[in-house]
Image (cartoon, helix red, strand yellow):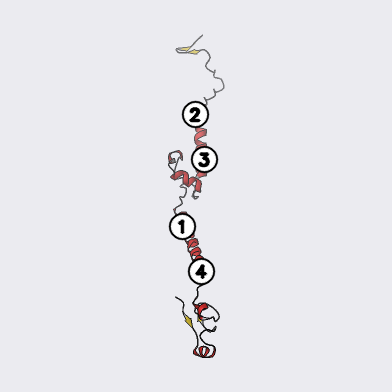
């Protein structure tokens, strides 16, 4: 609701149709119709709406960061990709859900090295034969 004011002396001197009216919140004197008009109302609404949207976006981002998991091993926050990996429907492929991406990669490398090491037979010690001549029942001569 616009509030317009003027002084009685100005009304008597210039009349009600002159630029003697002041709208509170604006600068300068205007005619009564200009003072009551609201040309910047839509712009003001858009600016207020944009500010409110920006504030909501900042609040949502802060809340999201507050919920972001932290690695139990190294203390780093999860990346968006790792977080998605641990919460998606395929979380069973993600391994330990309490560790970040680099720690998970270390786990995978360790598991792969252990698997390869278990698959390779041990080399014979010096002085031992490689098993030639052995059968089911012992050494053959």
Mark 2 to mark 4 CA distance (whole Å):
71 Å
Residue at horizontal 50 percent and vertical 48 percent from the top: 80
Q: Up-down: is 32 above or below 45?
A: below
Q: Which label's residue is closer to the chain start, 3 or 1?
A: 1
Question: Alpha-carbon neighbours of circle 1 within 10 Å: few (<14), some, or many (≥20)?
Answer: few
Question: Alpha-carbon neighbours of circle 4 within 10 Å: few (<14), some, or many (≥20)?
Answer: few
Q: Which residue is tagged 2? A: 118
Q: Nearer the viewer, residue 87 or 134?
A: 87
Q: Identify the element where label 2 is drawn.
A: helix
Mark 3 to mark 1 CA distance (whole Å):
33 Å
Q: Nearer the viewer, residue 122 or 26?
A: 26
Numbered mark located on residue 44 in the image: 4
Q: Nearer the viewer, residue 100 or 117?
A: 100
Numbered mark located on residue 106 in the image: 3
Mark 4 to mark 3 CA distance (whole Å):
55 Å
Q: Which residue is tagged 1? A: 60
Question: Alpha-carbon neighbours of circle 3 within 10 Å: few (<14), some, or many (≥20)?
Answer: few
């Amino acid at each position: 609701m616009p509030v317009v004011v003027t002084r009685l002396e100005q009304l008597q001197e210039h009349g009600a149709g002159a630029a003697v009216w002041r709208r509170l919140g604006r600068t300068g004197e205007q005619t009564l119709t200009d003072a009551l008009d609201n040309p910047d109302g839509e712009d003001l609404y858009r600016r207020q709406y944009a500010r409110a949207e920006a504030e909501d976006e900042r609040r949502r981002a802060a809340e999201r960061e507050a919920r972001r998991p932290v690695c139990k091993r190294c203390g780093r926050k999860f990346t968006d990709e790792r977080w998605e990996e641990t919460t998606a429907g395929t979380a069973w492929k993600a391994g330990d859900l309490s560790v970040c991406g680099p720690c998970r990669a270390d786990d995978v490398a360790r598991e792969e090295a252990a698997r390869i090491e278990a698959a390779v037979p041990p080399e014979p010690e010096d002085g031992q034969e490689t098993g030639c001549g052995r059968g089911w029942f012992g050494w053959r001569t």
